[in-house]
Amino acid sequence: MIDEKQLISHLYQNRENGQWMIQTNDEHQKGVADMAASFAGQFGLPSWGRALGLLHDKGKERAAFQQYIRKMNGLPTSDKKRYDDHTHAFVGGILAKELMGKDVSQLLVNQIISHHTGLHDFGDVENILKERLLSEEINEGDISINKPLLFQEFIDSPFSKSKVEWKHFHHLSRMLFSCLVDADRLDTERFMDVESWRKRGNSATLADLLPQLEAYMQKLQSNAADTKVNRIRRQVKEQCSRTSSSEKGFYSLTVPTGGGKTLSSLLWAMKHAVSHSMNRIIIAIPYTSIIVQTAGLLKEIFGEENVLEHHSNFDPDDIKDEENREKAKLATENWDYPIIVTTNVQLFESMFSNKTSDCRKLHNMANSILVLDEVQMLPTGFLRPIVDALKAYQEMFGISVLFTTASQPVLSGLIEGTNPKADFKGIEHIKEIIPEEFALHDQLRRVKLSIDDTGKTYDEIAAKVSEYNKVLCIVNTRKDAKELYDRLPNDGVKLHLSRMMCPAHLHETIGKIKTLLKDESQPIVRVIATQLVEAGVDIDFPVVFRQEAGLDSVLQAAGRCNREGRSAMGHTFVFSLAAEKRNPFGSMADSNNARLNLPEDSDWFAPSTMKAYFCQLYSRKQTFDEKDIKHWLYKPTELCFETASKEFRLIDDTSINVIVNWENSMELIEQLKESGCTYSLVKQLAKFTVGIRSYDFKQLKGYGLVEEILEGIYVLADRSQYNKATGLSLDNHWLEEVLMI
């Protein structure tokens, strides 16, 4: 029989003997306190983490909660009083406020009352506590929190000692929340689900893994031919190795396509981490196509047990080894792996989120290295909060940031736009790893760039493209891709790539292109694609056409040309479709106009030209904080976490996903109807989805072509509406408007 005086936090019944296993509230709070203190110790606030742990579940001492947990588990209770409210989180909030005062409520109070719901806006915090009273059964006498120690620790913390600007305070507040949430979940798991608890963590350190990388790179080098390109790659690698022990801070690695950027940046990051005893490497990439390639390479080097792949297109169930599969599933919750490969969206939206599931991982970013690949893809409309966040994480949480790209944007100094009130201070100092005297853009120059800004028709461009046998043409919209594809002659092989194709078919087609380019028996291979191939898709054509766009996009396209240096010089042509009234619009128009404003005789591949381009681009921007995140988060006493979280969306995607009839998708749909939504089924079906505009969706639904099989899950079963060559067809029913990728 369970003692009614025993304050229960968690309990379960042993399946073998029927005995009730109880975790007392005191045990749980102390367990969380120890863990949260360890996490917060990474940035100098262990006592604050401990305080959060000791207070977060004090509310479980309420008679209402004890009655609730017993009744929920079918246990008898002698307390006959009926309680309307069994919530508990507010109690710790009240105690924290009484203990520390209102001035530090955003470091303790909000975290405690929000540890199940997500961080609240400041006004809601006040409302939650306003009419709440402590129950008489709450024992305030056992709270062993050293208030003077808390204040002294804050004074000695990086936030105070480094004189971090108060506008960054919300990141500190969110980081403490992360420490509490993860510690709470882990301690609960340790009691309730020992099997999962034992699977967590990874014993390998970056110091353990570094020899594997060095051995891999040495093997590559010894097997590589003594060519100019390979000598340059070796030079880049050696420079990365030499500079890796420099102090923590901001670094950039600007290396043209073919310079060995991926492996050299990893070598720098690992050696930098080892020299500073850092915990992990987090690699953030804008495109899932690059993530898949990068993660595949890293798993080959270090083993899949040491590399966590975390993005929407990755299904942990695809991992064959059961132990590694279960460990990876658990690690997606808190990033407790030595190497993480993720998306920009996952990374930055988590850094500005109020949700427990998103914030839980943040504390594991402390004392880590963040590698931002293809950094020029950071959206200018969010540039201020992103750059400010990176500065805050470096100053407060001891991270180092490495920017890697072939076309480095301007992120330092004063970032200026058309509105002086929108100007903001960028990163004070970014150290370039590769010195100017290396002149890599000259040494690795393999492409001649020709620009013709006079307007052309579809027929004219199609005719020009058809003059070449192996050629890639990149355009700005799905419509342009289909129009040009339809105009190409049918001799040889012609292929189409756009987001009107489902991911499975895209992957298949990209694989086919790579195979065909290696097949000398196929002399004609012509591909029309949207900009989805510009970064991360490892294909190599001797000739590339690119519809007018920003210089960064043009150079990305040029990176698909003569990539391996098979010829002395490849050729990339930039063209306009103005004769078809297909001019760039929106942000793409700003980017294109910034390029057009550069001198016609510019060396397009020179870093100085890229710098001038980004200055031109920024000068056309009204704001670098289009969702006004500074208004919601930069006032320490008025933090609006929930509102900011809703506003901070890097991809404003209003498209609706439709599952198309391709391969075994309809079989999976039948399974879904029978068994309902499961993680595995949803992941498998994601491979067969196409995102379309709401207008087009309504049209399809109006024609009776779309069926909602479960809430929010739509299927287009008509096989004739999905074309193997060009993807989902809309032409049968209405004129297609411009569709961006």
Image (tube, helix red, strand yellow):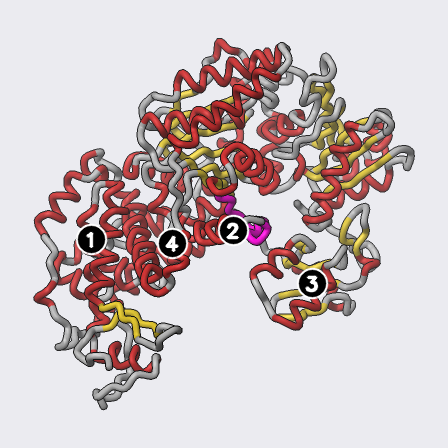
| Magenta extent | 308-318
The earlier-in-sequence mark between 4 and 3 is 4
Name the residue beneath numbered marker 1.
50
Q: Is 469 rendered above or below residue 623?
A: above
Q: Nearer the viewer, mark 2 or mark 3?
A: 2
State the image coordinates of residue 476 (x, y, percent, origin top left): 69, 39
Q: Is 574 rendered above or below residue 700?
A: above
Assess whether mark 3 and mark 1 are in contact (beta carbons under 8 angstroms): no
> What amino acid type is highlighted by mark number 1?
Arg
The earlier-in-sequence mark between 1 and 3 is 1
Binning the other alpha carbons within 10 Å of mark 2 as few (below 14), some (14 to 19) or many (20 upward) gives: some
Name the residue beneath numbered marker 4.
198
The earlier-in-sequence mark between 2 and 3 is 2
Secondary element type, mark 4:
helix
Secondary element type, mark 1:
helix
- Whether residue 442 is visible, yes or no, is no
Indicate the quadrant where residue 389 lies.
top left
State the image coordinates of residue 319 (x, y, percent, origin top left): 57, 49
- Residue at 25% across, 86% down: 77
Task: Depth check: give the residue in front, 61 or 124.
Answer: 61
Name the residue beneath numbered marker 3.
668
Outermost residue toward the front in this view: 17
* In magenta segment, residue 118: no
State the image coordinates of residue 86 (x, y, percent, origin top left): 28, 77
> What amino acid type is highlighted by mark number 4?
Arg
Spatial CA span between label 4 and label 2 = 14 Å
Task: Depth check: give the residue in front, 741 or 67.
Answer: 67
Name the residue beneath numbered marker 2.
325
Secondary element type, mark 3:
helix
The earlier-in-sequence mark between 1 and 2 is 1
